[in-house]
């Protein structure tokens, strides 16, 4: 590699000096932003309002992207300002976020994508524990998986929505990419493959083709599989790229999931619903009268008002054989007149109806 001559080196030093000056200016502006955010926090505290305002935070990001007009890489700008917003929000009042752990699972990734890295994250051993932490207000928010595009609905999350007094106040979609990882990075060293049952199922065809003789073992999480692989050179894990970096493991094969576009939807649990954003979703739990046409009576008032039903999932009531609850997602916010009227109309054919919450439609976050 050639060395810079004196003229080139001088030019480089001048440019670096400009970068240093810009960086200092950015720090001064960030400090000023933090002071304003703290004043906002004091105003919210007097009104006993939650620091998290999902609608406002999306407005901030969209305003920045529109102003930028693509000159700075948009994805990088979203990450940068996402963390700035996270730090400023946390300065207003530190947030406690419970998630289905341990760390480096896809639920952990979803939590940091939604809230940024500033809050205090506490890993829970089960989905039920996440609900308990939020309901008892030991956590401000919780993050749990609710459905996967390949494996379907997470039943324990549906049960938690029924059993605990919480609100759904957000959602986020995370693309699921599974890597095969171990200490050596070599396939011929693998004697066992460990992972969560869902991860093994999502990679079954690749495993059958490339490692048909290697036994598969189920563990409670992809993170636990990575921990085993970190201490046992004969073990490979199917886990996230974050797990490989965290546990200093090597990638044997990347993206071994069988279906491209594999995505998991995660719910954000809390106590207050966000205000309308103009692009919202409302989640309901209901049970229907045991009469002919009861399901039609549910759908007809929604269709009549032009309300799009995006999900309907049945779940048996455990202590009442052959009786079912329905989990329903509709487009719109419960503060909108047509949505409110639609919900009131379907109440007539329900023996029970619970509104779980309204929240902005989730984004797919890489």
Image: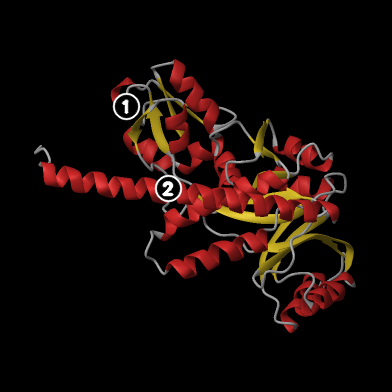
Q: Earlier in the sequence, mark 2 or mark 1?
A: 2
How many C-alpha atoms fall within 10 Å of the one at disc 2: few (<14), some, or many (≥20)?
Answer: few
How many C-alpha atoms fall within 10 Å of the one at disc 1: few (<14), some, or many (≥20)?
Answer: some
- Determine the secondary structure under disc 1: loop
How much space separates mark 2 and mark 1, taking CA atoms?
Answer: 39 Å
The residue identified by callout 1 is 185
Residue 135 left/right relative to 183: right
Classify 285 as above or below 87: below
Q: Residue furthest top?
A: 232
Q: Is residue 265 visible?
A: no
Classify 93 as above or below 246: below
The percent coordinates of residue 316 (x first, y second) are 78, 50
The label shown at residue 90 is none
**Nearest to the observer: residue 251 or residue 298:** 251
The residue identified by callout 2 is 23
The residue positioned 75% from the left and 77% from the top of the image is 302
Q: Is residue 204 visible?
A: yes
The residue positioned 79% from the left and 55% from the top of the image is 44
The percent coordinates of residue 125 (x first, y second) are 68, 30
Question: Residue 143 sits in which quadrant?
Answer: top right
Question: Residue 332 sits in which quadrant?
Answer: bottom right
The percent coordinates of residue 348 (x first, y second) are 90, 73
The residue positioned 39% from the left and 30% from the top of the image is 181
The residue positioned 62% from the left and 33% from the top of the image is 101
Of marks 2 and 1, the one in the foreground: 2
Residue 6 left/right relative to 110: left
């Amino acid at each position: 590699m050639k060395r810079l001559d004196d003229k080139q080196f001088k030019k480089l030093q001048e440019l670096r000096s400009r970068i240093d000056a810009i960086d200092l200016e950015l720090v001064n502006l960030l400090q000023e932003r933090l002071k304003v955010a703290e004043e906002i926090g004091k105003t919210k505290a007097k009104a006993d309002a939650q620091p998290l305002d999902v609608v406002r935070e999306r407005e901030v990001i969209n305003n920045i992207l529109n102003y930028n007009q693509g000159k700075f890489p948009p994805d990088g700008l979203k990450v940068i300002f996402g963390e700035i917003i996270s730090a400023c929000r946390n300065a207003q009042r530190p947030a406690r976020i419970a998630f289905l752990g341990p760390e480096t699972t896809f639920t952990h990734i979803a939590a940091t994508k939604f809230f940024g890295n500033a809050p205090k994250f506490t890993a829970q051993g089960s989905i039920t524990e996440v609900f308990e932490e939020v309901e008892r207000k030991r956590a401000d928010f919780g993050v749990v998986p609710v459905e996967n595009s390949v494996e379907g609905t997470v039943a324990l999350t549906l049960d938690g929505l029924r059993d605990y007094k919480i609100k759904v106040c957000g959602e986020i979609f995370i693309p699921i990419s599974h890597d095969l990882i171990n200490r050596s990075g070599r396939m011929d060293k693998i004697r066992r493959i460990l992972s969560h049952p869902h991860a093994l199922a999502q990679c079954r065809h690749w495993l059958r083709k490339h490692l048909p003789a290697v036994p598969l073992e189920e563990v409670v999480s992809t993170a636990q599989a990575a921990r085993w692989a970190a201490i046992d050179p004969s073990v490979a894990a199917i886990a996230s790229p974050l797990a490989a970096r965290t546990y200093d493991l090597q990638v044997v094969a990347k993206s071994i999931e069988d279906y491209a576009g594999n995505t998991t939807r995660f719910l954000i649990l809390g106590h207050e619903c966000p205000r309308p954003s103009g692009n919202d979703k409302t989640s309901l739990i209901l049970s229907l009268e045991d009469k002919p046409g009861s399901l039609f009576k549910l759908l007809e008032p929604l269709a009549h008002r032009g309300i799009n039903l995006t999900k309907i999932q049945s779940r048996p009531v455990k202590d009442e054989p052959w009786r079912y609850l329905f989990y329903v997602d509709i487009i719109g916010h419960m503060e909108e007149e047509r949505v409110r009227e639609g919900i009131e109309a379907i109440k007539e054919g329900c023996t029970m109806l619970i509104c779980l919450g309204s929240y902005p439609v989730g984004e797919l976050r890489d």
